[in-house]
Image: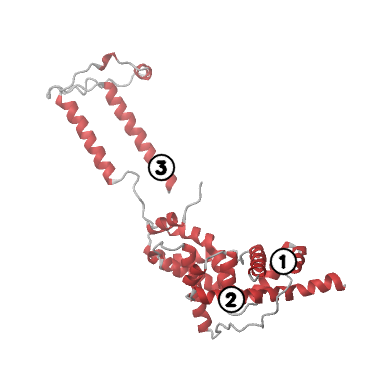
Amino acid sequence: MEANPDKKLDDFLKKTIKSAGFEEPSVDFTASVMDQIQQKEGSKFATSYKPLISKNAWISLGLILMAVFAFLLSGEWESDFSNITLPFMERLSDLSLPDLSGKFNLNSIDNINIHPNVIYAVLMLSVFLYAQIIYLKRNIE
Amino acid sequence: MSRLTDLEILIKIKTGDILSFSLLVDRYKYLVYTAAFRMLKVKEDAEEVSQDVFLSAFKALDTFRGDSKFSTWLYRITYRKCLDYLKKNQRWIDNKGSDISEYHDIGELDKRMEDLEQQERKLQVRKAIGELPGDDGLLITLFYLEELTLKEIAEITGYSPNSLKVKLFRSRKRLLSLLKKEMEPEIIQKYGG
């Protein structure tokens, strides 16, 4: 019998108290707290920038590049890329880019025969990679 | 963008992103301030102590193990800071309240409160809770507003679940009397002209 009035009171109080909600602190409460934290504790947490490409990523890239060059220099491959012509490459030759094929014909070392398209590709990649890094750095800062 | 969990924010802070702490402050400032206000009953004091709670919480973030809710941890810090503040200012928690009245007709009181404007009702209820002695207001808030269990409230306050049961039993009856008292001017206004 006791349970009923108690339950009724409980339900009433729950509804009433929930309707009153939380009290409100000042409008600049958060800003004030963060100011104090930055003043007192900020020096301990100097902003540390994480590099875009981590050390490990660089090492891996370096190793991959070395492997690729080793493979190319080893001469244990044979392929004739002269027949492969993609549309943009044709346009490239229309723009009369410098003829690099001669410059990379290192006669003193046997088996080096890098196709000009590879050179163009690497050059363009480097240019765009560099541009991207500058753009990203600027945007993040 | 989905909301970051407390744990995700804590990880960001630990990696040096102090500003992410503001997300936690925004999330829990109402809770901490309400708890402080229930204990201290003065807005300026509650504001000061609440800010101090977050400063202390920030310094002690490493000690938060995640075995309880972050809100429970904050409540515990708030409760202790309030007790320290009251002690320092020689305002001891006085749990001697007015006599608990007889059982009231809740139905009628409920109806009268519903007739009030929402904002007015809010103010009346908050005023009544504010008049509860000692830390009763906080206990009532934790139990009815936050719906914490007796075990959780015991963890925050250090009271045993059994003594909490007794305290809550008394304080809710007191609150009922206070609410009725708050509503009396309204009745006179409505019926007495």
Foreground residue among B11 and B147: B147
Cα–Cα span, label 2 and label 3: 56 Å
Task: Find residue B136 and report its horizontal and vertical position in percent.
Answer: 59, 76
Q: Residue at x 61, y 77 (%)?
A: B170
Q: Chain of mark 3?
A: A
Are the residues at dot 2 and dot 3 in contact (C-beta closer than 8 Å)? no
Foreground residue among A131 and B164: B164
Q: Is residue A125 visible?
A: yes
Q: For mark 2, does the 10 Å Cα neighbourhood hold few (<14), some (14 to 19), or many (20 or more) residues?
A: many
Quarter residue A28 falls in: bottom right
Dot 2 and dot 3 within a common chain:
no
Mark 1 highlights which residue? B121
Label of residue A136 in the image: 3
Mark 2 highlights which residue? B136
Please identify, in this view, whether the residue under mark 1 or under mark 3 is nearer the observer. Answer: 1
Please identify, in this view, whether the residue under mark 2 or under mark 3 is nearer the observer. Answer: 2
Residue type highlighted by circle 3? Leu
